[in-house]
Image (tube, rainbow, N blue to C red):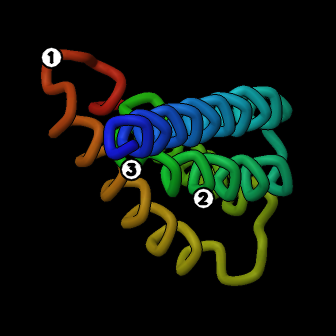
């Protein structure tokens, strides 16, 4: 009985983990689609999706560097559109971008994307 319980518990854990990874993959896929639109609104949505993916797996290299890239895109688009307070937005979003880039670099120091 004890073995059955542990086996069932382990199976449940694996299933939940797999669903979480699938959800993170879905968030990344949708975020990548939005990133290609390159609008201030799509960058904002993109950031939120990468943050959701990172809630599932904070050590997701791809989600970290792409989240960084989306923060940079948002700041650059705010400047391009001359959004009120764009300088402050650039500073705020630039700092956030650096956090995610640093996390990506720590995870995979030999891959170039985090240095972007």
- Give the mark toward the camera: 1 or 2: 1
- Where on the picture, by quarter, is residue 32? top right
Mark 1 or mark 3: name the one nearer the start of the chain.
3
Residue at 33% across, 36% down = 3
| Cβ atoms at labels 1 and 3 below 8 Å apart | no
Q: CA distance from mark 1 to mark 3?
A: 19 Å
| Callout 2: SS | helix
The one of 57 and 96 positioned closer to us in this rendering: 57
Residue 75 numbered mark, or none:
2
Q: CA distance from mark 1 to mark 2?
A: 27 Å
The one of 24 and 11 positioned closer to us in this rendering: 11
Crowding near pointer 2: few (<14 within 10 Å), some, many (20+)?
many
- Give the mark toward the camera: 1 or 3: 3
Crowding near pointer 1: few (<14 within 10 Å), some, many (20+)?
few
| Callout 1: SS | loop
The one of 58 and 83 positioned closer to us in this rendering: 58
Name the quarter where the N terminus is drawn.
top left
- Give the mark toward the camera: 3 or 2: 3
Q: Which residue is mark 1?
A: 110
Residue 90 coordinates in the image, percent (x, y): 53, 67
Crowding near pointer 3: few (<14 within 10 Å), some, many (20+)?
few
Q: Judge left or right: residue 105 versus residue 86.
A: left
Mark 3 or mark 2: name the one nearer the start of the chain.
3
Residue 45 coordinates in the image, percent (x, y): 78, 54
Q: Which residue is mark 3?
A: 58
Q: CA distance from mark 3 to mark 2?
A: 23 Å
Residue at 49% across, 38% down = 8
Name the quarter where the C terminus is drawn.
top left
| Callout 3: SS | loop
Q: Judge left or right: residue 102 versus residue 84.
A: left
| Cβ atoms at labels 1 and 2 below 8 Å apart | no
């Amino acid at each position: 009985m004890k073995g059955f319980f542990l086996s069932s518990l382990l199976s449940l854990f694996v299933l939940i983990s797999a669903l979480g990874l699938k959800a993170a993959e879905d968030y990344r896929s949708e975020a990548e689609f939005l990133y290609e639109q390159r609008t201030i609104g799509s960058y904002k949505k993109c950031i939120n999706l990468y943050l959701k993916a990172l809630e599932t797996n904070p050590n997701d290299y791809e989600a970290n560097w792409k989240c960084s890239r989306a923060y940079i895109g948002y700041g650059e688009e705010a400047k391009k559109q001359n959004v009120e307070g764009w300088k402050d937005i650039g500073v705020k979003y630039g700092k956030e971008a650096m956090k995610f880039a640093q996390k990506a670099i720590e995870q995979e120091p030999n891959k170039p994307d985090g240095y972007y």
